[in-house]
Image (cartoon, grey):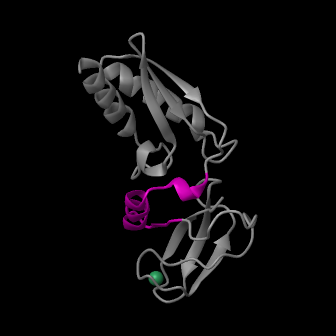
C-alpha cells in the first residue's frame, strides 16, 4: 500500500514539471512522461524526447529529477526512444492549455511526412482558419510563426510530427 502511494506521489511530482520552452504545459500534458517506477527506493522516470535534437530534452530530464528529489525520492531518468513521441500524444487538456496560451496546437494527423509542408492552422485567438505562415521557425525550432488574417493576431504553431 505504501509502495502504491509512493508511486502515485512520484508520478504526481514528475508529471507537474512544466516544459521549459512552453511553460503552460507539463510533461504529462505533452505526453512525454511515459512512466514513473519505484525500483529499490529509486524513482525512475521514463521520458520520450519530443523533437529530436530539441535542446529542451536535457533540461526536462534535469527538471524531472529535481522534482522527484524535492518530493523525497532518489531519482533518475531514462530516455525512451521507441516508440517515438508524436504530437498525437499531447493530451486534450494539453491542447486546450496551448490554445489558451496563444499557441495553436498541432492539427494534422501524424504520418503524412509533411513537417515542412503547408498546414491549415486554426487561430488560437478567434478560431478562424484563415491563417498564413510568416516563418518556419517561431520562438523555438519546434514552432512555426503564423498570423491570423481574420483578427491579425500573430501566433506560434506547435508543429506536427
Ligand atoms: Zn484570429
Furthest residue in direction front, as rendered: 1
Choose between 41 and 13: the one closer to the eye.
41
Q: Is residue 150 above or below residue 142?
A: below
Q: Residue 70 magenta-drawn?
A: no
Q: Main secondary structure of the magenta part?
A: helix
Furthest residue in direction top, as rendered: 40
* Residue at 29% over, 25% down: 4
Q: Is residue 12 above or below residue 129?
A: above
Image quarter of the C terminus: bottom right
Q: Is residue 43 left or right of residue 148?
A: left
> Splitting the image into 4 quarters, where does residue 156 fall?
bottom right
> Splitting the image into 4 quarters, where does residue 80 fall?
top right
* Residue at 73% over, 67% down: 112
Image quarter of the N terminus: top left
Q: Is residue 147 left or right of residue 74?
A: right
The x, y position of residue 33, in whole percent, is 48, 39
Q: Residue 96 magenta-drawn?
A: yes
Choose between 66 and 3: the one closer to the eye.
3
The x, y position of residue 128, in whole percent, is 48, 86
> What number of labels is visible?
0
> Which segment did they paint magenta?
86-105
The x, y position of residue 108, in whole percent, is 61, 70
* Residue at 63% over, 39% down: 55
Q: Is residue 30 above or below residue 62?
A: below
The x, y position of residue 62, in whole percent, is 50, 27
Amino acid at each position: 500500500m505504501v509502495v502504491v502511494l509512493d508511486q502515485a506521489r512520484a508520478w504526481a511530482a514528475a508529471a507537474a514539471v512544466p516544459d521549459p520552452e512552453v511553460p503552460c504545459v507539463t510533461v504529462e500534458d505533452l505526453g512525454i512522461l511515459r512512466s514513473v517506477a519505484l525500483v529499490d527506493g529509486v524513482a525512475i522516470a521514463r521520458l520520450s524526447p519530443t523533437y529530436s535534437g530539441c535542446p529542451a530534452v536535457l533540461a526536462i530530464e534535469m527538471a524531472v529529477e529535481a522534482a522527484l528529489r524535492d518530493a523525497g525520492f532518489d531519482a533518475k531518468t531514462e530516455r525512451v526512444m521507441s516508440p517515438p513521441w508524436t504530437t498525437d500524444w499531447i493530451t486534450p487538456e494539453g491542447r486546450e492549455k496551448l490554445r489558451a496560451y496563444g499557441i495553436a496546437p498541432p492539427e494534422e494527423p501524424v504520418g503524412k511526412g509533411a513537417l515542412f509542408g503547408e498546414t491549415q492552422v486554426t487561430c488560437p485567438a478567434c478560431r478562424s482558419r484563415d491563417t498564413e505562415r510568416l516563418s518556419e521557425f517561431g520562438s523555438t525550432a519546434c514552432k512555426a510563426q503564423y498570423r491570423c488574417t481574420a483578427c491579425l493576431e500573430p501566433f506560434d504553431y506547435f508543429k506536427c510530427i
